[in-house]
Amino acid sequence: MPTALTDLCRYPIVQAPMAGGGSGPELAAAVCGAGGLGFLAAGYKTADGMYQEIKQLRSLTDRPFGVNLFMPQPSLADGSVVDVYREQLAGEATWYETELGDTDGPVDDGYEAKLAILREDPVPVVSFTFGCPSRAVLDSFAQVGTYTVVTVTTAAEAQAAQWSGADAVCVQGVEAGGHQGTHRDDPHADGTGAGLGLLALLGQVREAVQIPVIAAGGLMRGSQIAAVLAAGACMAQLGTAFLATPESGANPLHKQALTNPLFTHTELTRAFSGRPARGLVNRFMREHGPYAPAAYPAVHYLTSTVRKAAAKAGDAQGMNLWAGQGHRLARELPAGRLVEVLSAELDAARAALTLPGSGGRAS
């Protein structure tokens, strides 16, 4: 089991855990095999489903890897606002010839059962999203030799993670694709000014805590990895960059959309899940985003059937196309090759800083 972040892998490159099928055993194994740190996303999976993927990943690689868990979420929404949103989505269900989903799904994502499995059969790294575990939970992982990471979006969240005993934090800038890992979902914070960019946030967190920091948010090139390492991060986490790889489990329509000129930009939206998440702006987001309630995971369950039907129909305009702000830089490379290219770009960026006239010191 690892004792420090630098023991995890050859390169300071982490493949982000992308729940919903993006990051499975094949992608994680390819990243690990190339010298990065691969992650499985346990979110939206049953405890047994998580365990089966861990077993499969172990059969594909003997390198360290991580598993990401969703923290249980409090029910914040008035049922009536979800009912109103259901009515607003009725046309989507009719168009895609499906029924809207049942909103009474579990709110804890099988958290306790997953904890039990990961303590009984430990993995090298466990990370947490949507909150910070208790000190007792983090201590229990320390006792079995598992390295723990908590996703944070503010300096205060990073301090809470340090106080609770996390080994490291993953600092997620607002540029990141998919769900924002905020510990408290505050609908009053929604808007164009919500969230800090990665470099500004990284600086604040580095001054607030003493534990290692992983940087995440819009990173697509080795030169960007060099930038966040220079700013104090120990490693860089990339999600969208790996989404387009052949080993990614993302829908082909999703992969194609990353560089399709039809999708010009990303925005944060509650339209698909009820929690802020960054994705490519499409028809569904434009039409329903302004009215979507803060009701995770009820909205996630509500829209799940429509999203699946849209994918089956080959219509990217009805799907959740999670992507970071750097999506246009996506490269359709095998995951292992992408790790190698990123590492070479990182080395080149570091070397450039030492050349005379480059702004760095001559070597």
Image (cartoon, rainbow, N blue to C red):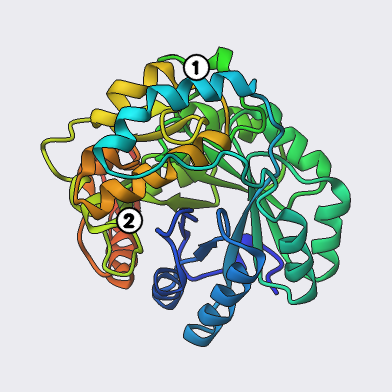
Q: Is residue 336 above or below residue 14?
A: below
Q: Are marks 1 and 2 in contact (CB under 8 Å)?
A: no
Q: Quadrant of the N terminus?
A: bottom right
Residue under the point 77% across and 46% down: 133
Q: How many marks?
A: 2
> Which of the two residues, 257 or 302, is positioned nearer the viewer here?
302
Q: Residue at x 30, y 49 (%)?
A: 309
Q: Mark 2 highlights which residue?
A: 243
Rendered view: 154 above or below 333: above
For label 2, the crowd category at 10 Å Cα-Cα, with few meaning under 14, some 14 to 19 and many 20 or more, is: many
How crowded is the residue under tag 1: few (<14 C-alpha within 10 Å), some, or many (20+)? some
Foreground residue among 33 and 298: 298
Q: Secondary structure at mark 2?
A: helix
Q: Residue 325: tell me if it is visible.
A: no
- Residue 170 horizontal/vertical position (percent): 58, 45
Residue depicted at x 57% and y 54%: 43
Q: Position of residue 355 (x, y in %)?
A: 27, 48
Res. 190 mark: 1
For the residues labelled 1 and 2, the Cα–Cα distance comes to 26 Å
The furthest residue to the left:
261
Q: Toward the viewer: 232 or 87?
A: 87
Residue 341 visible in the shown view: yes
Considering every residue shown, the one lying at the far bottom of the view is 59
On screen, residue 299 above or below 189: below
Amino acid type of the residue tagged 1 in the rendering: Asp
Q: Is residue 153 left or right of residue 178?
A: right
> Of callouts 1 and 2, which one flags the residue occurring earlier in the amino acid sequence?
1
* Secondary structure type for disc 1: loop
Residue type, numbered disc 2: Leu
Residue 141: x %, y % from top left: 79, 62
Residue displayed at 46% across by 33% down: 198
Q: Which mark is residue 204?
A: none
